[in-house]
Amino acid sequence: MSPALLTRAPREAALLAVGEHRSAHELTNADLAARLDTSDEWIRRRTGIRTRRVAAPEESIVAMGVNAGAKALATAGVDPASVDLVILATCTAARPIPGLAPQVAEQLGARGAGAFDVNGGCAGFCYSLAMAADTVRAGSAETVLVVASERLTDWVDADDRSMVVLFGDGAGAAVVGAADVAASRAGTGAVGGPVGIGPVAWGHDGANAPVIEIREQFLQMQGTAVFRWATTSLVPVARRACELAGIEPADLAALVPHQANLRILESMARSLGAPDAVLARDVVDNGNTSAASVPLALARLVGSGEVESGDLALLFGFGAGLTYAGQVVRIP
């Protein structure tokens, strides 16, 4: 290793762009009520979900991830051939080997990139974003593509009304680069403010991991235990992410938690102390898409104009493991 690499000053990392893939097929509450002992009112009251997207057979984890990643790269103006690393967050691959990140990278045209998978459950995107940012800060990469792609419906019993109402499929992606690159594209000469991608606050409650697990080929969850954990244990971690970024929760323009259940999201938002922040509610129309839910929700906020470039947003993933991770980012 050259002396220049050993003495290079630390640099900041920033989001350059986001992208999304949403399946065309919707599974509505009315569809479920037509064949199960449930109703639109029952589902909305308990989850806030109105409909969820279900991937078609050709919409594989790789195919959805490639589509989301291509959109993010195009928005960032980044040639896929210049990507140094591709990280794929997924917990729904049909088999553990081979990993799917190399296929995503190959199909995108990022043939010179490193590539690996991350299984952090529903926190997978935030874990992957943290690794991408640290890789850029360390100088190991100039540009990293983070993709989160999930097919939850492959792992849900279609006759289990407690589970099938919750989950959907989809993919989201983010391009991460050096903050000076992001600033030059914005024409400002500086990222401005306390963070590009803030330090991660993360952890686990592995002692209670069995509350979400695959049993007899299907995803099972102790919903009451998960709700209690998410609404009582995670807000201090979210506050810690703000502290690490050098801001107060009141400085946030947006809250983008894992889209598990609208009731959980609303409870966390009330407790955090960010009264002016818009709360991402992608779960209403897309269901719980595990690792893909945070980038999908962020992409919707950006696309709808509910947040503006330069705004501060808290991203926060939590779920199977039990794992959690969050960081403050500046909207690209």
Image (spheres, rainbow, N blue to C red):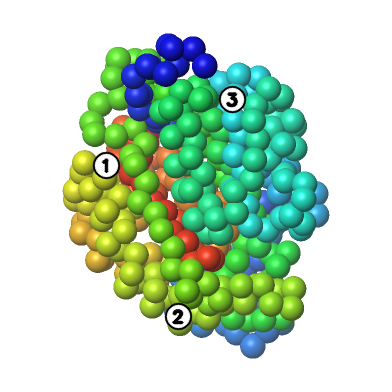
Residue 81 in the image: x percent, y percent? 65, 19
Q: Dot 3 corresponds to which residue?
A: 84
Along the line of sight, which residue is nearer the eye, 137 or 164?
137
Q: Which amino acid does label 1 sit on?
A: Ala
* Label 1 close to label 3 by CB (< 8 Å): no
> What mark, if any, has residue 17 been given in the picture?
none
The image shows residue 330, relative to residue 292, as above or below, that is above
- Asked which secondary structure carries label 2, the reply is helix
Where in the figure is residue 149, as x and y percent of width and height?
Answer: 63, 49
The reply, left or right, for residue 56 in relation to residue 241 is: right
On the question of residue 157 being in view, the answer is no
Residue at 72% x, 44% y: name it: 100
Q: Where does label 1 land, which residue? A: 245
Q: In whole angstroms, how far apart are the C-alphas of marks 3 and 2?
A: 40 Å
Which of the marked residues, 1 or 2, is nearer the chain's N terminus? 2
Which residue is at a point 53% across and 77% down the rendered structure image? Answer: 211
Distance between the alpha carbons at the discs numbered 1 and 3: 26 Å
Q: Earlier in the sequence, mark 1 or mark 3?
A: 3
Residue drawn at 64 percent across, 30 percent down: 114
| SS category of the residue bearing label 1 | helix
Visible residue check, residue 202 = yes
Quarter in which the C terminus is drawn: top left
Label 2 belongs to which residue? 225
